[in-house]
């Protein structure tokens, strides 16, 4: 997998490897900026396409192939 840049994740598409409650496909809806501009980005907000439910996760979790696949698979 290519290295991810958290600033370029906005509106990227992701598929959960183990869907729950029919939530399989997600979009990164928001990149959460840190309180201090000099700090690194830690979190993103993802939105389920099916239910529009949102959750905040560490953007580094998206690099875990056991949890997420890039794109809609």
Image (cartoon, rainbow, N blue to C red):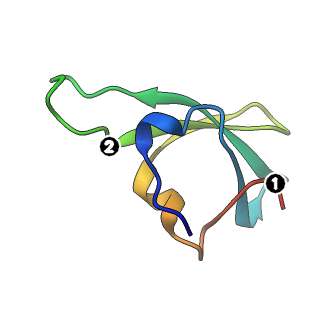
How much space separates mark 2 and mark 1, taking CA atoms? 23 Å
Q: Quadrant for residue 29, please give it.
A: top right
Q: Which mark is residue 10?
A: none
Q: Is residue 1 left or right of residue 21?
A: left
Quarter of the picture holding the N terminus: bottom right
Please tell me which residue lies in front, 53 or 37. 37
SS type, badge 2? loop
Disc 1 element = loop
What x and y, as percent, mark residue 10? Answer: 57, 32
Please give the residue where the numbered disc 1 appears in the rendered image: 72
Residue furthest bottom in the image: 66
| Quadrant holding the C terminus | bottom right
Residue 71 locus on image (x, y percent): 75, 54
Please name the residue shown 23% across and 39% down the image: 40
Residue 59 vs 35, above or below: the answer is below
| Vertical arrangement, residue 43 with respect to residue 20, above or below | above
Horizontally, residue 67 falls left or right of residue 52, namely left
When the figure is inspected, residue 44 is found, relative to residue 37, above or below; the finding is below
Which of the numbered marks, if any, corresponds to residue 42?
Answer: 2
Considering depth in this image, is 22 or 67 the residue closer to the camera? 67
Q: How would you rate the neighbour count of disc 2 (Cα within 10 Å): few for under 14, some for 14-19, many for 20 or more?
A: some
């Amino acid at each position: 997998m290519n290295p991810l840049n958290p600033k370029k994740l906005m509106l990227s598409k992701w598929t959960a490897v183990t869907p729950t409650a029919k939530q399989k496909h997600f979009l990164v809806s928001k990149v959460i900026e840190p309180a201090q501009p000099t700090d690194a980005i830690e979190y993103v907000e993802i939105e389920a396409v099916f239910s529009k439910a949102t959750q905040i996760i560490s953007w580094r979790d998206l690099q875990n192939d056991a949890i997420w696949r890039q794109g809609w698979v």
